[in-house]
Image (spheres, rainbow, N blue to C red):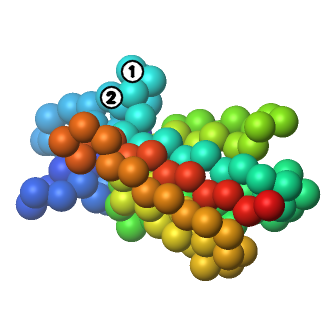
Amino acid sequence: MCHAVYLRGHWQWRAVPPDAATVTCSACHRSADGVPAARLVLDGTFEAAHRQEILGLVNHRAQRLHREHPMERVMAITSGEDGTAITTTGMHIARAIGNAIHHAYGGKLDLDYGHAESELHVRWHRS
């Protein structure tokens, strides 16, 4: 459990009031259930050659967003011969990470909102 506090209609990072009810936030539920809101796929020869640098940017951007928006988290990052896959608890963080990579390295960025705009698939490719 993350210890985020729901106050005035928003999840926030702050001290938990002593009389607060304990609930599990949606991001913790998504993580526990293994159900991401978004999936990013990063691939191409450039990605393979610059993977550590790109992952540094991913982690920096994710940490910054998570501090500001407790429900926006990276769930998992897996890398292999076919590229890197990143799952997130929210669509905003996935879109922000994709945009940051595209801004820093160019390439082609595709955003595909799935069924009823409740999931997002982001693909960044650079040869």
Q: Residue at x 75, y 43 (%)?
A: 83
Quadrant that contains the C terminus = bottom right
Residue projecting furthest to the top: 33
Residue 14: percent from left, percent from top: 32, 59
In front of the other: 39 or 5: 39
Q: Residue 84 lies in what quarter of the image?
A: top right
Residue 94: percent from left, percent from top: 47, 55
Q: Would residue 117 be visible to someone looking at this image? A: yes
* Amino acid type, mark 2: His
Read off the residue under disc 1: 33
In front of the other: 71 or 43: 43
Q: Is residue 78 above or below residue 108?
A: above
Q: Residue at x 73, y 56 (%)?
A: 55
Residue projecting furthest to the bottom: 103
Residue 28: percent from left, percent from top: 37, 33
* Amino acid type, mark 1: Asp
Q: Would residue 51 be visible to someone looking at this image? A: no
Residue 58's disc number: none
Read off the residue under disc 2: 29
Dot 1 surroundings within 10 Å: few (below 14), some, or many (20 or more)? few
- CA gap between label 2 and label 1 equals 6 Å
Does the CB distance between marks 2 and 1 fall below 8 Å?
yes
Q: Residue at x 72, y 50 (%)?
A: 43
